Amino acid sequence: MILGENGEKMSKSRGNVVNPDELIVKYGADTIRFYEMFMGPLEASLPWSNSGLDGSRRYLDRVYRLFVEEENTKKFSNINSKELDYIYHATVKKVSEDFEHLQFNTAISQMMIFTNEAYKANSLYIPYMEGFIKMLSCIAPHIGEEIWEKLGHKGVIAYEKWPTFEDDKLIKNTVQIAIQVNGKLRGTVETNVDIGEEELKKLALDQEGVKKHIEGKEIKKIIIVKNKIVNIVAI
């Protein structure tokens, strides 16, 4: 149940009724639909929040920019750089399972994670971006249809085949490594799991937080705990 902003059941006598027609004019139907599905579990009673609507609109605008602004569209490619392999297949798996159990809020959270990773990527593999829009269109059908058309498709996205995931792509091939100087944390780096030791040492020494704490000192040794820690001993 959706409650009024004051946490009480909506009623005209309490003056806390939300007029959907007015909200649709201001925010658009997709934003209202998106926000209601993102509020929380379907069985929960939650208060309405216009600030939540603002956040939903900002996210949908961000997705739209990802597909239409030149600085992003120039990264679209039919060649898979594999940057988004893990997050895409993890997103398809999570969203598919959550939709099946009507857990729309957590499915949306995962789509937001994918969006963040897509903005950070150097290359956007078109089949992955198309798969993402297929999933998002279930929550925001109007923007989904418009983006689908901008991607060059003629048919209705609702009739497209649902994206699938590959189990072998769900093994994450990057790790977060802590960089220490004399046992104290001075930074972190995300790198490939099979990075060589010499390359990892160079990467660690290039960190600004590390440079500051080894300046004027002699590096005695660099201790590496594979895929976990690099500790630079400097005196």
Image: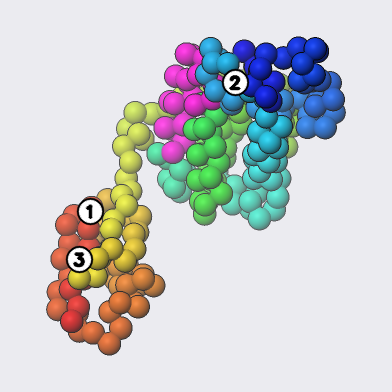
The residue indicated by pointer 3 is 183
**Is residue 192 something one can see in this rendering?**
no
Q: What secondary structure characterizes most of the magenta part?
A: helix
The Cα atoms of the two marked residues, 1 and 2, are separated by: 41 Å
Residue 222, image x and y in percent?
A: 17, 70
Sequence-wise first label, 3 or 1 = 3
Q: Is residue 156 above or below residue 229?
A: above
- Local SS, label 1: loop
Which residue is at the front of the view, 107 or 18? 18
**Cβ atoms under marks 3 and 2 closer than 8 Å:** no
> In front of the other: label 3 or label 2?
2
Which residue is at the front of the view, 161 or 187? 187
The residue indicated by pointer 2 is 46
Q: Amino acid at mark 2?
A: Leu
Point 28% across, 79% down: residue: 214
Question: Quarter of the image containing the C terminus?
Answer: bottom left
Chain part drawn in magenta: 87-106
Point 28% across, 58% down: residue: 178
Which residue is at the front of the view, 173 or 107? 107
In the picture, residue 170 is in which quadrant? Answer: top left
Question: Quarter of the image containing the N terminus?
Answer: top right
Sequence-wise first label, 3 or 2 = 2
Residue 107, image x and y in percent?
A: 51, 26
Q: Amino acid at mark 3?
A: Gly
The residue indicated by pointer 1 is 228
